[in-house]
Image: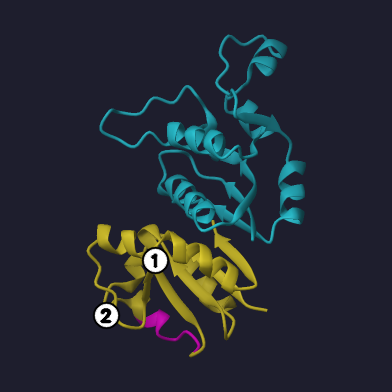
Chain colours: A cyan, B yellow
Amino acid sequence: MKFAIALFAAPHQPAARRALRFAQAALADGHEIVRLFFYQDGVHSASSSVVSSQDELDLTAEWRTFVKAHNLDGVVCIAAALRRGVLDTDEATRYGRTAASIEAPWVLSGLGQLHEAVQEADRLICFGGP
Amino acid sequence: MTTLHLLSHSPYGNDRLTSCLRLFGAEDGLLLSGDAVYALQPASAARKALASLPSGAGLYALAEDLQARNIQADDAVTAVDYSTFVALTLRYDKVNSWL
């Protein structure tokens, strides 16, 4: 079956880890993930600027490894990301900012990508809140 | 049309559980994760509220969250891992996350 997974929670919230574990289990069980869509505070989970303590789970690194390993379509909402200071090099150049923290495998794109994913998938699973 | 409800908020912080139970269909499922598993604390008001679920309802909780909080769920609750979580989202027609 095909899943679309939307993450609304920040990386330090348990929901962000739950989304990753769900996505890993879905692929392990032979299902397909048509798209990951990071929205609202979820955009921080795609940021390469996040630094985790050595004795804590590095969730952003785990997400990056997971998305790369399975060649997934990882989309970060561009409007939610820009307002939180999470930019890729194109946007950093466009707005004259010095720091970019979105790089491959993640791409910035619009909310339409979530809508399209929902049409393609059998289920949309949203992770947010605590 | 059946719905699997996903709830991760503590029953002591807001009214999401109450709202969820109000909308709950006869054949729906409820999967508790995170602090929402505190609703399974024996003899609590939330556990009593969950006892009013329809007889055809499924009541589930993420095993890791029960264990992390040392909650001994009663026999009416099915503890699930992530693989079963995935399967549950497909067993029901729709999935609604109480964000």
Instruction: Locate residue A61 relative to residue B5 in the image: left or right.
Output: left
Q: Is residue A33 above or below residue A74?
A: below
Q: Is residue A22 above or below residue A57?
A: below
> Which quadrant is the N terminus of chain A positioned in?
bottom right
The residue sitting at 50% across, 24% down in the picture is A48
- Which label belongs to residue B99? none
* Residue drawn at the location 48% of the way across and 79% of the way down: B58
* Other-residue count near label 2 (Cα within 10 Å), few / some / many at <14 / 14–19 / ≥20: few
Q: Is residue A67 above or below residue A82?
A: below
Q: Are marks 2 and 1 on the same chain?
A: yes
Tell which subunit mark 2 falls on. B
Q: Which residue is mark 2?
A: B43
Looking at the rendered structure, the kind of residue marked 1 is Pro
- Which of B6/A1 is in front? A1
Identify the element where label 2 is drawn.
loop
Q: Position of residue B7 (x, y in %)?
A: 47, 63
> Which residue lies most toward the bottom here?
B55
**Magenta-highlighted residues:** B48-54
**Quarter-wise, where is residue B84 in the image?**
bottom left
Q: Which secondary structure, mark 1?
A: loop
The amino acid pointed to by label 2 is Ala
Query: Which residue is under mark 1?
Result: B11
Badge 1: residue crowd in 10 Å (few <14, some 14–19, many ≥20): many
